[in-house]
Amino acid sequence: MSAMEIIAEPALILHLLARIGTVLAQPVTLVHPSHFEMLGGPRIREIAARAEFTPWLNDAVAKSLGMRSFELPEGLADRLARHPQSRAAALVAGAQPQEIALAARLVAAAIQRRRLSALVTRAERSAAVAQLGSGAFQLAVREAFALYPGLAELAPEETVPLEMEAEGIDDVPPLTVPGYACLGAFLSQVEPGLRPLLTYRVPQDLTLPETVLAPGPHGQLLALLRRKIPGWHECIG
């Protein structure tokens, strides 16, 4: 260990592992319902709202998805103690649905900042805000050029629809798809053993790539997650 290396506190490591454990223990509320459509999908969530049904429904969903056999990657606790990128990967893998959606919107906005900054009509900008949210759109037009320029290298070759009505994946606005893809690539690169947990958190039809991020986008994604997701700065360090 170098003199400058900072080891995370054991309580933080336990917190990150507990977040991952919560996904495995509560798949009814934390896994996207498209993955257990055969059991009733959203209807299962409604039934599970009754406390007497919650334990056995979680068990049924976990078994159907093979989550009971999930094993933490070897050496994960040590990497969580030593590496900020592993802590960020654990945060993504164990995130609440709203955290994943926020991260995807912000990352997608930074990735597509050239296109978003070039929108001139009120209708186009309103359509983009409807998909990404005002905060993510402002990040694209005001911050991304200076703070996260490398993420623009990940912009999709095909133009992503601005219209919410465009044919796409359930619950995932078209403009946010590059953000989810980037998060998937980040997990594949940093903690591939945790990647299945992100796969379960997004719609079944949404394919997450296993590509490797270049150093620029990789470091800037880590910085964005650290700065912009509430509570993550303290965990990532």
Image: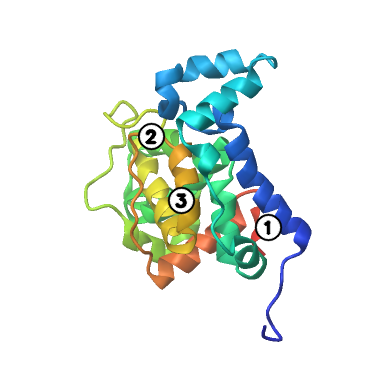
- Sooner in the amino-acid sequence: mark 2 or mark 1: 2
Q: Position of residue 162 (x, y in %)?
A: 31, 36
> Label 1, on which residue?
235
Kindly indicate the quadrant of the structure image that contains residue 189.
Answer: bottom left
Compute the Cα span from label 3 to label 1: 19 Å
Badge 2 amino acid:
Pro
Task: Tell me what residue is drawn at x 31 percent, y 31 percent.
Answer: 163
- The residue at the far bottom in this view is 3
Badge 1 amino acid:
Cys
Task: Tell me what residue is drawn at x 70 percent, y 17 percent.
Answer: 51
Q: Going by the image, does 14 lie left or right of 53?
A: right
Query: Is 37 rendered above or below residue 126?
Result: above
Secondary element at tag 1? helix
Task: Tell me what residue is drawn at x 61 percent, y 18 percent.
Answer: 48
Residue 231 visible in the shown view: no
- The residue at the far left in this view is 158
Badge 3 amino acid:
Arg
**Which residue occupies the foreground of this view, 156 or 162?**
156
Q: Going by the image, does 39 lie left or right of 169?
A: right
Query: Is 135 rendered above or below residue 111?
Result: above
> Label 3, on which residue?
195
- Closer mark to the observer between disc 3 and disc 1: 3
Residue 188 bears which disc, if any?
none
